Image (spheres, rainbow, N blue to C red):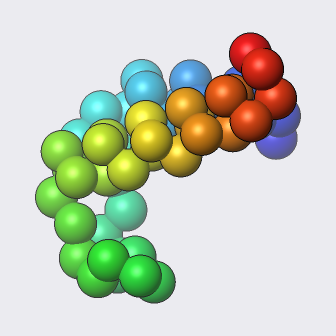
Amino acid sequence: MKPIRLLKKFQNSGAAGVTKNQYAFYGFMTPEEWDIQQYGHVNHHLSQFGV
């Protein structure tokens, strides 16, 4: 699946779409924490490539 599709799927599924699995580094996270983490991750890569 293309990255933009994955981002849109994550965005559109809302809190119900957030995994209940434990994050490898942070442990269990709330939907709000997942949202913050995903924003930071995507922003990092967009900045990395000058987008």
Which quarter of the rendered picture does the N terminus lie within? top right
Question: Which residue is situated farthest in the top direction here?
Answer: 51
Q: Percent x, y for residue 33?
A: 22, 52
Q: Quadrant of residue 15?
A: top left
Label count reads 0
Nearer-the-camera pick, 48 or 12: 48
Point 43% across, 27% down: residue: 11
Nearer-the-camera pick, 21 or 43: 43
Q: Is residue 41 visible?
A: yes
In the image, taking residue 33 as reference, residue 21 lies left or right, namely right
Q: Is residue 38 above or below residue 3?
A: below
Q: Percent x, y for residue 3?
A: 75, 35
In the image, taking residue 49 as reference, residue 13 lies left or right, namely left
Point 78% across, 20% down: residue: 50
Q: Is residue 31 above or below residue 2?
A: below
Q: Percent x, y for residue 10?
A: 48, 36
Which quarter of the rendered picture does the C terminus lie within? top right
Point 30% across, 70% down: residue: 20
Q: Is residue 16 visible?
A: no
In the image, taking residue 45 as reference, residue 18 lies left or right, namely left
Q: Is residue 19 above or below residue 45?
A: below
Point 67% across, 28% down: residue: 47
